[in-house]
Amino acid sequence: MACFLGCFFAGGTMTTEAVQQSKVIDVRGYRILVNRIKPNEHVTSATFQAGGYNWHLRIYPNGSHPGYGPDYVSVFVELMTPGVAARASAELSLVSWTAGSSQPRVFKLGKHTYRHGGSSVWGVPYFATKTMLETPTYSYLRNDTIRIKCTITVFVKRPPPPPITVPPSELSADLRKLMVDHVQGTPPADVLILVGAESFGAHSIVLWMRCRELYYQITSSSSITVSDSDVQPAVFRDLLHYVYTESFPAMDDLGSSQKAEKLRGLLAAAVRYKVNRLKLICESKLCTSLDVSTVVATLVLAEQLQLTTLRSACIKFIGSSQGQIQ
């Protein structure tokens, strides 16, 4: 059974996938192999696949190295796919034929770069003793067969997927289209807002999402009447533009006094209709653009609207400009 363990980014350029697969191998005729195979000689298991590569086990019935003595059975993992290098880790375990008869004998092999041929194998010279295998209580030997489970985890480096360019949000542009009834395909306005002698079309769903105070003023005749003594038509136009687009109206062509007057009107409208982000923008711009000709009017508005930050900024400015205030 193959299992995809996960992936991570190495160095921000390549993706490394860990693919794991287990194989249970029965080594039949164990006693015959012990009698016929010399020390440092091996037999091989059937080839199996893991991580897209072919593998098999080398089993040394009388040990792989004279230094460990002939009492050990040795088991090694070998890559059989030619012409490649595979980075992998492995786990070899001796499986008991009777569940619970003995503790699993497990050997974990760390990461190793396997190559086909030569001496590029990795394994356990002291995998099991013959005495252990022949002990009935361990139940490692049945019908002259021992069972070995091999789990291989292959680490495969792959290039990252191509980047997907996500375009900027078009929400503001789409809502801006709603403000112009003649744009093809846009639904017509369903609310008429009367501000003094001027009228503005709006969409109830936009007001519900962006300006509840206006939405709740919609009458049964789908209209809203705003007194021009509260909000001037030009200011309301800027407010509605912000509600639809969340973009601040351009003021670069205005002088400081005109700009401050427009900001004060828009600030008052934002407070009245609870458009909080617009309120904060206007308040911030007024705080950073105070001058001797506008600070008094701005302070009066801050007192009326109970805007403590703006009020404090005005008082500090006046305190530092004694004799210059108009």
Image: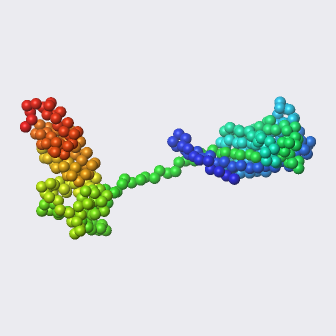
Is residue 290 placed above or below 246 in the rendered structure? above
Colour setting? rainbow
**Res. 253 in view:** no
Q: Is any atom of residue 274 visible in this view?
A: yes
The reply, left or right, for residue 17 in relation to residue 21 is: left
**Which of the pair 205/24 is nearer the observer?**
205
Q: Quadrant of the C terminus?
A: top left
- From what the image shows, is residue 205 above or below residue 273? below
Query: Image check: 239 left or right of 81?
Result: left
* Residue 223 in the image, given as x and y percentages of width and height: 21, 66
In percent of width and height, residue 63 lies at: 84, 37
- Percent across and percent down for residue 135 are 87, 40
Seen at 88% across and 43% down, the residue is: 136
In depth, the one of 247 and 300 nearer the eye is 300
- Please provide percent x and percent y for residue 211: 27, 56
Query: In which quarter of the view is residue 68 placed?
Result: top right
Residue plotted at (86% across, 32% down): 69
Q: Residue at x 22, y 46 (%)?
A: 282
Residue at 11 percent of width and 37 percent of height: 292
State which quadrant residue 300 falls in.
Answer: top left
Q: Is residue 53 left or right of residue 281?
A: right
Residue 115 sits above or below residue 191 on the image? above
Query: How many marks overall?
Result: 0
